[in-house]
Image: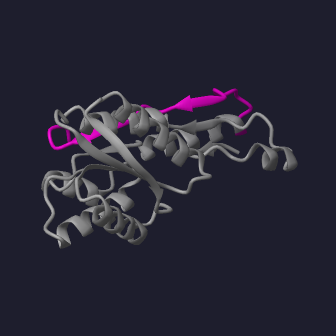
Amino acid sequence: VVNIDNRLDPTLMRDLSLVDVPFISVDNEDGAYQAARTVSATITAPTEAIIIEGITSAQNAIDRTHGAQRAFAENPMLTLIATETAHWKIDEAYAVTKRLLIAHPDIGVIFCANDMMALGTIQYLTETNRTGVLVAGFDALAEARQAISSGRMVVTVDQQAAQQGYLGVSYAVSLLAGEKVPPETMVPVKIITREAQP
């Protein structure tokens, strides 16, 4: 067994007698920090920001929220006014964005903990002809890359899923051959912007 992306629940692993399971992932907090910092670094006037997070009990959602909060806190011009979940879903992110922008029309920065939620946010902004709101996401989906190319989104994070998968298969083959593999491997993320699209 090789654990990829989200760490398996330790209690479940113990109950299933799974020990020394190698873990492959990315540093979600650092990836979110880099993405949020890419946006926050452009802010030079007082600006309100929100975070749309994933499932609040999921470790990757927790880490991404912490990373974005850390980046926003570094810029005294940014005020984080709300952190709300949209459960990774496009339609829920649309609804959260709509509700928060109606209540706080001066929001200028929105960090979404995945690209599906960012796309929901962008959908609302597009439908309401709203410009000047900087949107960040996470996952580097094709649709997010297109949104970045067209200027509707600023940044996303590439988790290099193919590299994680490759390492997972490679480690599984090594384990089957009785070889040792690293207990934990963190694959570096890539920050995708209009200027830096591989």
Of residues 190 and 42, the one nearer the viewer is 42
Q: Quadrant of the N terminus?
A: top right
Q: Is residue 189 above or below residue 6?
A: above
Region of the chain picked out in magenta, as a range: 176-198
Nearest the viewer among 101 and 11 is 101
At 46% from the left edge and 56% from the top edge, which residue is drawn?
A: 84
Q: As rendered, which of 99 and 143 lies closer to the eye?
A: 99
Majority secondary structure in the magenta region: loop
The total of numbered circles placed on residues is 0
Question: What is the x, y in percent for residue 151?
Answer: 13, 53
Residue 182's spot in the image, x, y percent?
63, 26
Write down the quadrant of residue 35 in the picture: top left
Up the image or down, 41 lies above or below 136; here it is: above
Q: Is residue 183 magenta?
A: yes
Find residue 45 and report its image quarter. top left
Q: Residue at x 66, y 29 (%)?
A: 183
Would residue 113 be visible to someone looking at this image? no
Of the 4 image quadrants, the one containing the C terminus is top left
- In the image, taking residue 40 as reference, residue 187 lies left or right, namely right
Residue 186 image position (x, y, % from top left): 52, 31
In the rendered view, does 14 fall on the left or right side of 56? right
The quadrant holding residue 117 is bottom left
Answer with left or right where residue 138 lies relative to residue 154.
Answer: right
